[in-house]
Image: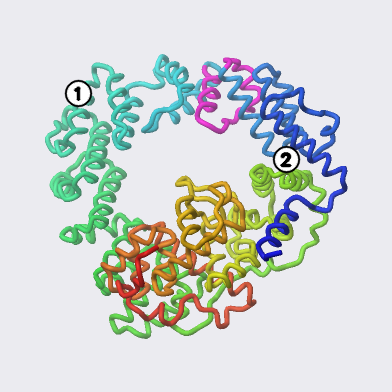
C-alpha cells in the first residue's frame, strides 16, 4: 500500500469512524437518508422512528416546518426557536419565518416572531419595516430610509415599503436626491436617471444640472451657486469631483486648486474630495503634483495616503522623503513593523546608523514578514510572541456532553462539513474566556484544523499560534515536500494562506481546496507532471489537491531558480506577471516585495514567507536556526536574471 493510499484511508477513517457502536452508524445512515428526503420534501420517505432521538433530528424538523410556512402559527415557530436556541437553526427559522410571513402579508405574525429585531437579508428587512408602518412608524421610517439610501437597486420586496414611505412624505425629494447622488458615484446611471425623474418640479434645476455634470463633470465650475441650497451644492461638488478625479486626475486637481478655496462644501466633503485627489495623484504617479499632495497629507491624516506616499518615495529611492513621511504617520501605523523597518532602511541609507539600529530592533520584536526581515538585519532570533496558554493541556471530555459538540460530530460523520462549521461558528460566537481555549484544543484534538484557525480569528486570539497555525496534514505535506524537493513548511504556509486549511474552500474565481487550485491549473500540472487528476470535484479532496499544488509551486521554484519570493508571487498572481515585474525591475528583495503592484499579492508573499517561519518554529520548538529567506534570496537583485525558463 502506498503512502498516499494509506493516508487517504486514514483520513476517511478519521471522518467516518469515531469508534461508535453499530447502532449509532445505523442511526447516522437513517438521519442521512432523512435529511436528503427532507430537502427534497419527500416526507413519506422519512423513517421517523429511526431518527426520533438522533441529535440531528432538529434539522429534519427545520425543513418540515419551513415547508409549512407561512401556515404555521407564531407559537409553533417560537417553540422551535426556543428548543434550538443553542443552534444556528434558531436564527434560520426566525429569518425564514419573517420572510414567509412578510411575503404573505401576515405582518402581525411577523412582528410577533421577530421580537422587534431586524432579520438578516434585504428582502426580509423590507418586510420587517413594512410590518411596523402605522404601528411604530418611526422604526419603519428609520429602517426604510436606511434601505433606500444606497447607490444600487434593492430587492423588489422593498418596493411596497418605499412606496408607502413616499406616500406619507417620509421619502421625499431630499431622500431621492441623496440616493441619486450615491447612484451617480457608484456608476449606476440607470438608477440615477430613474431617480431624477421622481424629483418634483421644484427640483428640476438640480436634476438638469445632474444630467449635465454626469456627462461633463468639469462643468461644475460654471454651476450657478445661487440657484441651489448649500446641501445640494455640496453633493454636486462631491459627486462631480468623484467622477472627474477618476476620469482625469490632472484636470480635476487643476480645477480644485482654482475652485477649492471658496467651494461651498462642508469640511467632510472637502476632505473626501482632497483624499480622492491625493490618492489618484499618487496611484497614477502624477509626480508633478506631489508638492500639492505633500502640502495636503498632514491635514488629511489618513493612513492609506501616508502608505502610498512612502511607497512612491521607495520606488524612487528617495530615502529622506521616506523618513519624513513615516515619522509623520499616526502612532499606531508608524509603530507597525513594516514602517519601523522602512524607517530603519531610510536611516541606514542616510548614514544614520544608530537610529537605524534602534528602529530595526523595534521592528524585530514583531511577528511578521518585516519583523522577521528586521531580525535578519540585526542578527537576532525571530520573536513569535506566542500566548503560552494555547499550549496548555485541557480536560476536554466534558465538552463531548455539549449538545452543540454532539451535533458537530454527527454532522461530520454524515458528511455535512459545511453545516458542522456553521454550528461551530455559532458555538464560538457564544463562548468566552477559558471555554474558547477548551474548544480550540478540542478542534485540534479532532483534527478540525480549519475550525481551530477560525477560533483564533473569531476570538481575536492572534498570539494563540497552535490554533492559528496547526500542524494540519503534516505527514502529507512532508511526503509531498520530499517528492518535490521543497520545504514542507512552505507548502503549509501556502495552504494556510489560501484556505485556512478548509479542504472544501471555494473562491469567487473558482479556485478549490486546501491549496486553492484553479481547475485549469490543476489540469495543466497534471499533464506536465504525469499526475492523476479526476476533475474539479477531486480538488476538494485533500490528497490530490496537495499533490497537484505541491507540484505547481515546485514548477514555479524551477522557473525562478529556486527563489521563493518570486515563486510565491507567481503562485498567487501568475508567472506572466512576475516575469514582467522582474524584467522591468532591478531591486533588492524588500523593495521588490513592496513594489508588487497588487496589494493582494504583496500581502500574500509576505504572509506565506512569515507563515513558513511560524510553522517551522512551532515544529522544532524554537526559532533558532530558522530562516525566513536564504542568504542568496536576501542578497541578490530581483531582475530578469532570476528567469530560468518560460516553459511552464
Quarter location, residue 95: top right
Q: Which residues are magenta?
A: 104-133
Q: Nearer the viewer, mark 1 or mark 2?
A: 2
Percent from the top left, x then y, of residue 150? Answer: 39, 32
Spatial separation of the CA atoms under disc 1 and disc 2: 57 Å
Quadrant of res 452:
bottom right
Task: Tell me if 24 is positioned left or right of 371 in this view.
Answer: right
Disc sitting over residue 86 in the figure: 2
State if disc 2 and disc 1 touch (CB < 8 Å): no
Question: Residue at label 1?
Answer: 205
Residue drawn at the location 29% of the way across and 56% of the way down? 299
Q: Main secondary structure of the magenta part?
A: helix
Query: Element at badge 2?
Result: loop
| Left or right of residue 542: residue 586 | left
Q: Nearer the viewer, residue 385 or 441?
A: 441
Where is residue 101? Give x, y as percent.
61, 19
- Above or below, 41 against 450 in this view is above
Give the vertical position of 274 relative to 380 (above or below): above
Tell me how the rendering is colored: rainbow
The answer to whether residue 128 is seen in the rendering is yes
Sequence-wise, which precedes: disc 1 or disc 2?
2
- The residue shown at (28%, 30%) is 189
The total of numbered circles placed on residues is: 2
Amino acid at each position: 500500500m502506498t503512502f498516499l493510499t494509506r493516508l487517504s484511508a486514514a483520513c476517511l477513517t478519521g471522518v467516518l469512524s469515531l469508534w461508535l457502536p453499530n447502532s449509532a452508524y445505523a442511526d447516522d445512515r437513517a438521519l442521512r437518508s432523512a435529511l436528503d428526503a427532507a430537502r427534497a420534501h419527500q416526507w413519506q420517505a422519512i423513517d421517523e422512528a429511526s431518527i426520533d432521538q438522533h441529535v440531528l433530528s432538529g434539522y429534519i424538523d427545520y425543513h418540515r416546518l419551513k415547508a409549512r410556512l407561512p401556515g404555521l402559527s407564531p407559537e409553533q415557530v417560537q417553540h422551535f426557536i426556543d428548543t434550538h436556541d443553542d443552534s444556528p437553526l434558531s436564527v434560520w427559522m426566525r429569518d425564514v419565518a419573517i420572510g414567509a410571513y412578510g411575503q404573505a402579508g401576515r405582518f402581525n405574525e411577523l412582528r410577533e416572531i421577530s421580537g422587534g429585531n431586524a432579520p438578516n437579508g434585504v428582502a426580509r428587512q423590507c418586510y420587517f419595516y413594512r410590518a411596523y408602518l402605522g404601528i411604530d412608524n418611526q422604526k419603519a421610517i428609520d429602517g426604510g430610509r436606511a434601505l433606500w439610501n444606497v447607490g444600487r437597486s434593492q430587492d423588489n420586496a422593498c418596493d411596497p415599503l418605499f412606496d408607502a414611505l413616499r406616500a406619507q412624505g417620509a421619502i421625499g425629494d431630499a431622500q431621492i436626491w441623496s440616493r441619486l447622488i450615491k447612484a451617480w458615484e457608484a456608476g449606476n446611471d440607470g438608477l440615477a436617471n430613474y431617480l431624477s425623474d421622481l424629483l418634483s418640479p421644484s427640483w428640476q434645476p438640480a436634476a438638469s444640472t445632474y444630467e449635465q455634470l454626469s456627462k461633463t463633470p468639469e462643468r461644475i465650475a460654471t454651476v450657478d451657486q445661487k440657484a441651489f441650497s448649500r446641501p445640494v451644492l455640496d453633493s454636486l461638488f462631491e459627486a462631480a469631483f468623484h467622477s472627474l478625479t477618476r476620469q482625469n486626475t490632472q484636470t480635476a486637481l487643476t480645477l480644485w486648486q482654482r475652485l477649492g478655496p471658496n467651494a461651498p462644501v462642508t469640511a467632510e466633503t472637502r476632505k473626501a474630495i482632497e483624499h480622492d485627489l491625493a490618492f489618484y495623484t499618487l496611484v497614477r504617479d502624477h509626480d508633478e503634483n506631489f508638492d500639492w499632495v505633500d502640502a495636503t497629507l498632514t491635514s488629511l491624516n489618513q493612513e492609506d495616503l501616508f502608505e502610498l506616499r512612502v511607497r512612491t518615495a521607495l520606488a524612487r529611492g528617495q530615502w529622506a522623503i521616506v523618513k519624513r513621511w513615516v515619522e509623520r504617520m499616526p502612532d499606531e501605523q508608524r509603530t507597525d513593523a513594516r514602517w519601523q523597518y522602512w524607517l530603519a532602511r531610510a536611516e541606514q541609507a542616510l548614514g544614520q546608523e544608530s537610529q537605524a539600529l534602534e528602529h530595526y530592533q523595534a521592528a524585530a520584536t514583531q511577528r511578521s514578514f518585516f519583523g522577521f526581515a528586521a531580525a535578519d538585519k540585526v542578527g537576532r532570533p525571530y520573536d513569535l510572541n506566542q500566548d503560552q496558554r494555547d499550549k496548555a493541556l485541557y480536560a476536554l471530555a466534558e465538552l463531548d456532553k455539549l449538545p452543540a459538540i454532539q451535533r458537530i460530530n454527527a454532522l461530520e460523520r454524515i458528511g455535512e462539513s459545511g453545516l458542522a462549521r456553521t454550528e461551530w461558528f455559532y458555538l464560538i460566537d457564544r463562548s468566552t474566556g477559558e471555554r474558547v481555549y477548551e474548544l480550540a484544543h478540542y478542534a485540534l484534538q479532532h483534527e478540525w484544523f480549519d475550525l481551530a484557525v477560525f477560533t483564533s480569528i473569531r476570538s481575536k486570539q492572534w498570539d494563540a499560534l497552535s490554533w492559528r497555525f496547526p500542524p494540519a496534514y503534516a505527514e502529507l505535506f512532508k511526503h509531498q515536500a520530499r517528492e518535490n524537493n521543497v520545504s514542507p513548511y512552505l507548502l503549509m504556509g501556502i495552504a494556510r494562506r489560501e484556505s485556512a486549511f478548509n479542504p472544501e474552500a471555494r473562491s469567487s474565481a473558482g479556485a478549490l481546496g486546501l491549496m486553492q487550485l484553479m481547475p485549469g491549473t490543476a489540469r495543466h500540472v497534471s499533464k506536465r507532471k504525469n499526475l492523476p487528476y479526476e476533475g474539479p470535484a477531486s480538488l476538494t479532496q485533500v490528497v490530490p489537491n496537495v499533490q497537484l499544488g505541491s507540484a505547481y509551486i515546485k514548477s514555479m521554484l524551477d522557473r525562478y531558480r529556486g527563489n521563493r519570493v518570486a515563486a510565491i508571487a507567481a503562485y498567487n498572481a501568475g508567472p506572466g506577471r512576475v516575469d514582467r515585474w522582474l524584467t522591468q525591475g532591478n531591486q533588492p528583495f524588500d523593495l521588490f516585495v513592496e513594489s508588487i503592484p497588487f496589494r493582494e499579492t504583496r500581502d500574500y508573499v509576505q504572509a506565506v514567507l512569515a507563515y513558513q517561519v511560524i510553522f517551522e518554529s512551532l515544529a522544532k520548538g524554537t526559532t533558532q536556526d530558522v530562516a525566513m529567506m536564504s542568504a542568496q534570496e536576501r542578497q541578490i537583485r530581483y531582475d530578469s536574471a532570476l528567469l530560468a525558463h518560460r516553459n511552464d
